Image (cartoon, grey):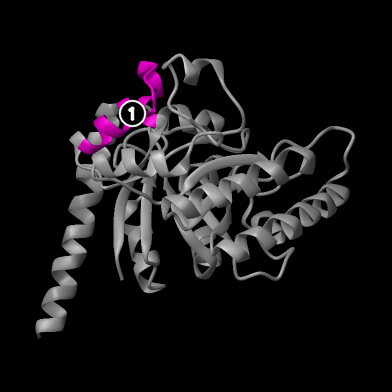
């Protein structure tokens, strides 16, 4: 069992900094794993150096070299393409899968997207099934997981999340569990994680400030970033215990809003993980 803290590069967005600035700061803080965000085509703010996402038009081997310069590895790609819109999500996710494989990443993270008003929910699930069936053929060839995140109308509940994850029988269709989104959507994040833990390949370690969170809980399906891990409503020791009991091997990818929060999150998670590692070492020696 190996659980590592990682960092989603959203943390640098507050400073209007580019991808390389995010890598540099993450490395200096002490992270060894990062989760970049990727986009299709060319995006004005990224091209001008004011945003952290990476274009899928870039050479992935160049990006891999840049990561290696900062002694960083990729836990997954944040490639949120709306599964209900196959004309968008199929080419986007297929490219993201190939990009991830070139970087040595095993996961691309996505969600169902915002349901158009003219599409009933049962029809939306049919469209999502078509999208996943198409995309997963590429995922299976490249041995990259497509991980569904609780983030929108359907997946905000554990039942809804499972309804999508069970649409297609593929070993590469898994879960990226977002603790903060689950809590905001009204689910119990511990019961929810326990229900899907055998399908989890990536974790968004998102904590939610208790003050603002209580006013939003049950009224939203998620949020881009949270507060520092340990400052909010999520019990990370309990989350880690659930993952350890399931022999989870992977990353807790912190989703927070500032570099200072990223630093405090790393300290909090390391304190918990190091305590477990010491316990496991003593148990083996004994």
Label 1: which secondary element: helix
Asked whether residue 276 is in view, the answer is yes
Residue 191 image point, x, y percent: 51, 61
| Magenta region, main secondary structure | helix
Q: Quadrant of residue 245?
A: bottom left
Q: Is residue 211 left or right of residue 192?
A: left
Residue 247 image point, x, y percent: 38, 73
Q: Residues within 10 Å of mark 1 (few under 14, many from 20)?
A: some
Q: Residue at x 29, y 66 (%)?
A: 2
In the picture as drawn, the residue positioned furthest to the bottom comes out as: 286
What residue is disc 1 on? Answer: 20
Vertical arrangement, residue 219 with respect to residue 112, above or below: above
Asked whether residue 229 is in view, the answer is no
Residue 61 image point, x, y percent: 42, 44
Asked whether 10 falls inside the magenta stretch, the response is no
Which region is colored magenta?
Answer: 11-27
């Amino acid at each position: 069992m190996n659980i590592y803290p990682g960092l989603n590069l959203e943390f640098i967005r507050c400073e209007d900094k580019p991808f390389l600035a995010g890598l540099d700061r993450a490395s200096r803080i002490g992270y060894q794993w990062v989760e970049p965000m990727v986009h299709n085509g060319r995006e004005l703010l990224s091209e001008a150096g004011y945003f952290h996402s990476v274009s899928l038009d870039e050479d992935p081997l160049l990006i891999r070299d840049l990561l290696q310069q900062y002694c960083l590895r990729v836990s997954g790609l944040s490639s949120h393409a709306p599964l209900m819109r196959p004309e968008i999500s199929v080419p986007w996710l297929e490219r993201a899968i190939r990009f991830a494989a070139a970087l040595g990443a095993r996961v691309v993270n996505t969600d169902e997207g915002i349901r158009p008003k003219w599409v009933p929910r049962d029809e939306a699930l049919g469209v999502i099934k078509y999208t996943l069936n198409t995309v997963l053929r590429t995922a299976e060839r490249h041995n990259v997981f497509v991980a569904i995140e609780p983030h929108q109308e359907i997946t905000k509940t554990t039942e809804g999340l499972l309804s999508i994850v069970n649409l297609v029988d593929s070993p590469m269709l898994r879960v990226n569990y977002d603790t903060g989104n689950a809590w905001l959507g009204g689910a119990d994040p511990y019961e929810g994680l326990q229900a899907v833990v055998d399908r989890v390949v990536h974790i968004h370690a998102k904590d939610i400030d208790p003050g603002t969170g209580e006013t939003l809980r049950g009224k939203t399906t998620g949020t881009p970033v949270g507060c520092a891990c340990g400052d909010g409503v999520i019990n990370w020791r309990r989350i880690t215990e659930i993952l350890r009991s399931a022999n989870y091997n992977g990353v807790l990818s912190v989703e927070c809003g500032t570099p200072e929060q990223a630093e405090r999150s790393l300290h909090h998670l390391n304190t918990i993980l190091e305590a477990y590692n010491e316990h496991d070492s003593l148990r083996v020696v004994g």
